[in-house]
Image (cartoon, helix red, strand yellow):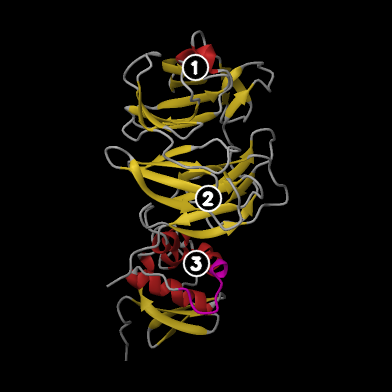
Amino acid sequence: MHTAQPAGRVRLNVGGQVFETTVDTLTGAGEGTMLCAMMDPCWNAAGAAGTAGGVPEYFIDRDPACFASLLDMLRTGELHVPAGVPERVLFREANYYGLLDRVRAARIGELDLERVRLAASVPPGRVTADRPIVRAAPDGGCCVTHTHDTTVRVYNWMLEERRPETKMFASCRGISRYDSYGIGVWDCITGEQAGPLSYPKPESKMGSTTKLQWLPNTKTLMAASVCSSFSMALVDSRDMSVVWSWWYDSAREGKNRCVVDAAVMEDERSVCLISDHHDLGLLDIRIQGNSGNVRWLHQSKMSSTSKCNSPKLAVHGGLLLASKDDTISVFGGPKYDLRLALRGSQGGGAINDFSVGGDRLFAVHKEDNVLDVWETPLPPII
């Protein structure tokens, strides 16, 4: 007598523990994942390792406790780490099944600076950096380097230090065979420097480029420089030509403030500036040239106990972020009033640089190179 196979059911023997679920749950893991591929008839020639009561059964020689958590995540969308299981072990198992992106989405919400929390503090690697710089990656990792060395510390989403696997691009300061200053341009195939962007007058005031920001809407690159005066330009990515430029010479302006950093707002119509005394100002990008049209929002809004570090700027979700000492202040609203302050890890010292990306906020401290990581936890399920 023929027994019909239960439709859509499958058993997985993981490390000796049997789990029964549906084909839809496993294929819902997404294309490219191991569990989805196992349900494909072409997974292997033998098919399932066996059957029990007409239900196909597969054996996987992995950790059953972690698999139980991952399977529950596929069923419910929530991630619960089993008691006694280190997160890194769960991440390792998720990576094996191709579920690391799903784990990240179930663990970290979209970056909301109003609800963000300090999630981790990573000690420095084998080589510490003088005046370290941090740049966030879209995948939730980051890299840390500094202004006078080629040493780079790269961290993946699990905050594990890794060797760089992709090419990196940065500003150049005349250290190559093209004895020039500006933006370095590299060939993506050979990895060799193809030539720099040399600034014609009056853009030559920019000196050495110290900050780059990609503007996706207009497909331009903001390049800024801090030298004897502050300068910036917008560069057309098609032919690397300067389409807009501006500079601020504090001596010529007769102002007792020096602009030390800039960040283009997300509407790509204005630039936020910050001075060495922490004055915040807005500059209209649509006005060409140095017409002195900075609208200073407020002066010395951020108190400081030290002058050792210049403040840094970033934008996220219409909010302004500015660093000083061990704190990142968040400004918002029509007048960009102070909303909240995010303090770094205790004893970390002054923040030398910070960066937003990949649903995370990273900050690196000057004295001990500790890397702080802020995340937004998912709201509780009611």
Looking at the image, do the residues carrying marks 1 and 2 touch, with CB atoms under 8 Å apart? no
Give the residue at the far right of this rendering: 126
Regarding mark 2 in the picture, which secondary structure is present there?
loop
In the foreground, 152 or 114: 114
Q: How many marks?
A: 3
| 378 lies left or right of 358 | left
**Residue 181 image offset from top left, x and y in percent:** 60, 18
Tell me the quarter of the picture where residue 20 sits: bottom left
* Amino acid at pointer 3: Asn
Q: Which residue is mark 3?
A: 44
* Amino acid at pointer 1: Asp
Regarding mark 1 in the picture, which secondary structure is present there?
loop
Give the residue at the far top of this rendering: 201
Tell me the quarter of the picture where residue 235 sits: top left
Q: Main secondary structure of the magenta part?
A: loop
Q: Which residue is mark 2?
A: 141
Q: Please tell me whether residue 9 belongs to the stretch shown in magenta.
A: no
Q: Earlier in the sequence, mark 2 or mark 3?
A: 3
* Amino acid at pointer 2: Gly
Camera sees residue 199: no
Q: Which residue is mark 1?
A: 249
Query: What range of the chain is rendered magenta?
Result: 81-89
